[in-house]
C-alpha cells in the first residue's frame, strides 16, 4: 500500500514528514494539522526501514500516543509500528528505572504511588512529627502535595511557590518544609516513588551513569516529542540526555507552538521551544501555517494578537475558508449586562449552530457565574469545564442557605447546611436544633447558644434577615460579615479564590429587587444540562478548552484585571502568557467569534461600579479587523462606526499600557507624587507593595489604592509614584 505524501499533505507538512535526519523543530500553528504530520512522519520512517524499536514517540497522554500509532499503522496497512516506544515522559522514565533501579540504590525494586498513596504517606509524616493535628486551618494533604509538585516541576523553592500562588499559607512554611522532608524519608525507607520522582531520577540515572546513557541513546535512532511548548525544564534536559552525546546532529523532532504555551502554572516553560535551535545547533525550523479550522477573518485577528508577542517564532496563519463575517468586539455597559448580551447572542447563534457547537470561554471559573444564571433563566442547558458550577459551589450554597431561611424558616436542607458550619454540630445535633427552632423551644435553644457562641452569632444574623427589609445585595453583604471568617476556617487552602466567587454573587444580586425572585432564578438549575450530552452549551476556562474547537466562540471579561489577570499586569512573563491564552481562546472558533469587554465592573469595596479598561491585547488590534458594537440605552447593541482609539503599536510590557485616550498613564497622571490628582483607575507604584490601581483620593493627601496580593491600602501621596 503506497502512501501518496504529496497528495495527502500540504508543502509544509510534507517537508516536516519527510525530513528524517538531524534536529527538526516544527512550529505548528493552531489547527494546522500537527497530528496528521506526526502520523505521516511515523509512516515515512517505517517505509525507510527504520526499526520501530528505535523510534521514541513522547506525548503528554498515552491516549495521544496510541492514537497516532494506530493511525500510522492504518496508513501502512496495519503493519510495522507495533513495537514503537510510545507514551508519556513519565511512562518511559518508569520503564528505564525498573531496569536500572539497583544503580540508584533501590535494590529491592521500586513502586510508583498514585496521589491517594502519596496522601497516605504524608499522613504518616504528619503523625510522626505531630504537625497540624489540632489546627483546622492547616493545609489539606492534597494541597500540600500540589504545592510540592509545583515546586519541583517549576524548580523553585517551596517558599517562592507559596509567595506566588498561596501567600495565605505562608505562615505554615516552616512546618511544610519539615513535613515534606519527612515525606521524602518515608518514601526512601519503603522504596516508593511519586509521579515527579520519575523524571528527576531518570535524569540522575542518565547524567550520573554515562554507560547507561550510551546504551539507551544507542537504542534510539529517532526521537519525536509532541506539544513541546508544554514541557518543563527537566523534560527538556531529558530530551538532550536521550541523544547520543557524540552525535553533532541527533535525529530529534520537537513539534509544538510557542504561541500556545499556557501551562506555566504547571511548570511548562516556553523557553524550551524558543531555545530549541540553541540547544540543537543547525536545527531545521519548519512552520505549519495553513489552518484547517477557522475562517480567514478570525485568523487575521489571531495574527494581529501574535504580532504583540515579545519572543516568538514569526508565523502568519492562513486558511482556504474565506468567510465574510468579521469577529465582533462587544462593549456592554457593565459585567452584569454582559451576561444578558452573551445569552442573547447564544440564542441568536442557536438558530444557526447546534448548542454543542457554541462555547463561552473565560479566564477564571468564577467569571461565568452571571452567564450561568442568565442561561438558567432562559432554560438553556450547559456543561462547565474548569471551575465549579455556580449552583454547586459550597461557599455559594452556604450564603444562599441563610437567605433561604429568611424566606422559609422550615427549610430543613438550608438549616442543615448552615448549622454544619458551626463547630461541634453534626447531622444529629442539626436535626435537634431544627426541631427546637420549629417548636421555638427556647430552653433548649438558649442552652445550646450558651455552649456555642458561634451559634448565637448565627441566630442573630438570621433574626436580622427575617426582621429587616433588605434588597438581595444588601442582605448578602450583611451575611458576608458573618460568613467570611467562617469561609477562611472552612476552606483555608483556597479561600481567596472562593471570596472572588462571593464578590460575583453580590454583583448578581444587584440586578434584583426582592430576595424571593433572586432565589428563584438561582435555583432554576437546568435539569437537562447533564442529560443533554451533545446538546448543551459549553462554558469553559481557556485552559480547559485547549485542543477543542467549536463553530461559535464567545470570550468574556476582556478587560484589565480580568483578562489579563491582575497578577499578570505586574509581571512581564505572566503578561505574555495571558496574551498566549487569548490567542488560544480565539483559535478555538471555526466560523464565529465574539469578544466582550464590559465598560464598568462592580466593586464591593466601593459599593458601586468602576470604569474598566479594554484588555491591552485588544487595544493594539487594527480597527478594520473587528466589528465593534456598544450596548445601547434603547436596547441591544449598535455598530460603532468610528475606530476605537488604541495604543501606539509595539508596546507589549504591562508598564507601557496606554489609556483609552491614546496617552500613557504617566502622561495623564504626571511623573511624580503630587504632580496631578489621579483619576480613578490610574496606576501607580509603591516601594513595598509594587504596582497598584488608584481607587480614590482621600483628602488632603492620601490615595486609596488596590495592590494585587495585598488588597486596599491607604497611602500618603509622597510615598506613591504615579505612572
Image: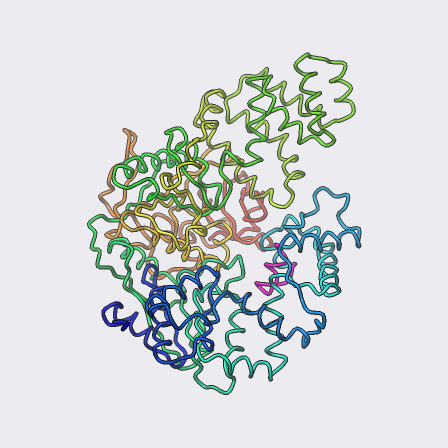
Residue toward you, 363 or 144: 144
Report whether 30 appears left or right of 145: left
Q: How is the image coloured?
A: rainbow
Which portion, as a residue range, is magenta? 146-158
Q: How many marks?
A: 0
- Rendered location of residue 246, percent (x, y): 50, 87
In which quarter of the view is residue 370 placed?
Answer: top left
Question: Residue 258, relative to residue 478: is it above or below?
Answer: below
For residue 478, say whether it is visible. yes
Most common SS among magenta residues: helix
Q: Residue at x 28, y 39 (%)?
A: 349
For the question of whether residue 605 can be seen, the reply is no
Residue 620 lies, in percent from the top left, at 33, 55
- Work out whether 188 lies above or below 167: below
Please tell me which residue lies in front, 47 or 153: 47
At x 64% / y 55%, what residue is drawn? 145
Judge from the rendering whether residue 31 lies leftward or rightward of residue 393; answer left or right. left
Looking at the image, which is closer to me, 317 or 95?
95
Q: Nearer the viewer, residue 698 or 7?
A: 7
The residue positioned farthest toward the bottom in the image shown: 246
Residue 611 position in % (x across, y down): 41, 40
Residue 602 in percent (x, y) is at 46, 36
Q: Is residue 640 shown above or below 212? A: above
Q: Is residue 615 magenta?
A: no
The residue that appears at 29% across and 39% down in the rendered structure is 630
Amino acid at each position: 500500500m503506497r502512501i501518496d505524501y504529496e497528495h495527502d499533505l500540504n508543502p509544509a507538512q510534507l517537508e516536516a514528514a519527510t525530513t528524517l535526519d538531524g534536529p527538526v523543530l516544527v512550529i505548528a500553528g493552531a489547527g494546522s494539522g500537527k497530528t496528521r504530520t506526526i502520523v505521516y512522519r511515523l509512516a515515512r520512517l517505517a517505509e525507510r526501514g527504520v526499526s520501530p524499536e528505535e523510534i521514541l514517540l513522547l506525548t503528554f497522554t498515552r491516549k495521544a500516543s496510541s492514537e497516532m500509532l494506530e493511525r500510522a499503522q492504518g496508513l501502512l496497512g496495519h503493519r510495522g509500528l507495533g513495537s514503537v516506544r510510545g507514551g508519556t515522559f513519565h511512562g518511559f522514565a518508569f520503564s528505564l528505572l525498573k531496569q536500572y533501579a539497583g544503580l540508584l540504590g533501590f535494590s529491592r525494586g521500586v513502586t510508583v504511588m498514585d496521589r491517594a498513596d502519596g496522601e497516605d504517606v504524608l499522613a504518616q509524616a504528619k503523625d510522626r512529627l505531630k504537625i497540624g493535628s489540632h489546627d483546622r486551618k492547616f493545609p489539606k494533604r492534597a494541597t500540600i502535595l500540589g504545592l510540592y509538585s509545583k515546586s519541583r516541576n517549576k524548580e523553585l523553592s517551596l517558599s517562592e511557590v507559596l509567595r506566588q500562588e498561596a501567600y495565605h499559607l505562608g505562615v505554615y512554611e516552616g512546618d511544610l518544609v519539615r513535613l515534606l522532608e519527612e515525606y521524602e524519608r518515608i518514601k526512601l525507607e519503603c522504596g516508593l516513588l511519586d509521579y515527579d520522582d520519575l523524571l528527576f531520577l531518570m535524569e540522575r540515572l542518565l547524567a550520573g551513569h554515562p554507560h547507561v546513557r550510551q546504551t539507551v541513546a544507542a537504542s534510539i535512532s529517532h526521537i519525536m516529542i509532541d506539544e513541546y511548548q508544554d514541557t518543563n525544564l527537566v523534560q527538556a534536559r531529558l530530551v538532550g540526555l536521550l541523544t547520543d552525546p557524540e552525535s553533532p546532529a541527533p535525529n530529534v523532532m520537537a513539534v509544538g507552538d510557542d504561541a500556545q504555551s499556557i501551562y506555566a502554572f504547571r511548570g511548562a516553560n516556553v523557553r524550551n521551544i524558543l531555545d530549541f535551535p540553541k540547544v540543537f545547533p543547525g536545527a531545521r525550523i519548519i512552520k505549519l501555517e495553513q489552518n484547517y479550522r477557522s475562517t480567514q477573518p478570525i485568523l487575521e485577528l489571531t495574527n494581529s494578537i501574535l504580532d504583540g508577542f515579545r519572543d516568538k517564532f514569526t508565523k502568519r496563519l492562513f486558511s482556504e475558508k474565506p468567510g465574510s463575517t468579521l469577529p465582533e468586539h462587544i462593549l456592554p455597559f457593565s459585567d452584569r449586562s454582559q451576561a444578558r448580551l452573551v445569552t442573547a447572542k447564544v440564542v441568536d447563534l442557536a438558530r444557526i449552530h447546534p448548542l454543542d457547537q457554541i462555547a463561552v470561554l473565560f479566564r477564571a471559573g468564577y467569571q461565568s457565574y452571571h452567564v450561568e444564571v442568565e442561561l438558567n433563566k432562559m432554560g438553556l442547558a450547559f456543561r462547565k469545564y474548569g471551575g465549579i458550577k455556580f449552583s454547586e459551589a459550597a461557599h455559594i450554597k452556604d450564603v444562599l442557605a441563610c437567605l433561604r431561611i429568611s424566606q422559609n424558616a422550615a427549610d430543613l436542607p438550608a438549616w442543615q447546611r448552615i448549622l454544619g458550619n458551626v463547630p461541634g454540630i453534626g447531622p444529629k445535633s442539626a436535626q435537634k436544633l431544627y426541631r427546637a427552632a420549629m417548636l421555638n423551644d427556647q430552653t433548649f435553644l438558649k442552652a445550646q447558644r450558651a455552649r456555642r457562641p458561634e451559634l448565637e452569632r448565627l441566630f442573630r444574623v438570621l433574626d436580622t434577615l427575617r426582621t429587616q427589609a433588605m434588597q438581595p445585595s444588601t442582605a448578602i453583604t450583611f451575611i458576608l460579615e458573618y460568613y467570611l471568617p467562617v469561609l477562611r476556617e472552612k476552606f483555608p487552602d483556597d479561600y481567596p479564590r472562593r471570596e472572588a466567587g462571593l464578590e460575583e454573587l453580590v454583583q448578581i444580586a444587584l440586578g434584583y429587587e426582592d430576595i424571593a425572585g433572586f432565589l428563584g432564578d438561582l435555583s432554576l438549575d437546568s435539569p437537562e444540562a447533564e442529560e443533554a450530552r451533545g446538546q448543551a452549551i459549553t462554558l469553559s476556562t481557556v485552559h480547559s478548552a485547549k485542543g477543542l474547537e467549536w463553530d461559535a466562540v464567545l470570550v468574556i471579561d476582556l478587560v484589565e484585571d480580568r483578562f489579563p489577570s491582575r497578577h499578570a499586569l505586574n509581571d512581564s512573563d505572566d503578561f505574555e502568557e495571558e496574551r498566549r491564552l487569548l490567542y488560544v481562546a480565539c483559535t478555538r472558533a471555526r466560523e464565529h467569534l465574539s469578544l466582550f469587554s464590559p465598560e464598568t465592573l462592580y466593586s464591593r469595596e466601593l459599593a458601586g461600579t468602576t470604569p474598566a479598561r479594554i484588555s491591552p491585547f485588544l487595544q493594539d488590534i487594527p480597527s478594520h479587523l473587528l466589528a465593534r458594537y456598544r450596548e445601547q440605552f434603547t436596547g441591544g447593541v449598535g455598530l460603532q462606526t468610528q475606530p476605537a482609539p488604541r495604543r501606539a503599536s509595539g508596546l507589549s510590557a504591562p508598564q507601557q499600557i496606554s489609556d483609552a485616550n491614546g496617552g500613557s498613564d504617566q502622561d495623564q497622571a504626571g511623573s511624580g507624587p503630587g504632580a496631578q490628582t489621579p483619576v480613578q483607575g490610574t496606576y501607580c507604584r509603591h516601594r513595598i507593595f509594587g504596582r497598584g490601581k488608584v481607587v480614590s483620593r482621600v483628602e488632603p493627601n492620601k490615595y486609596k489604592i488596590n495592590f494585587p496580593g495585598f488588597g486596599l491600602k491607604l497611602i500618603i501621596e509622597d510615598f506613591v509614584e504615579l505612572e
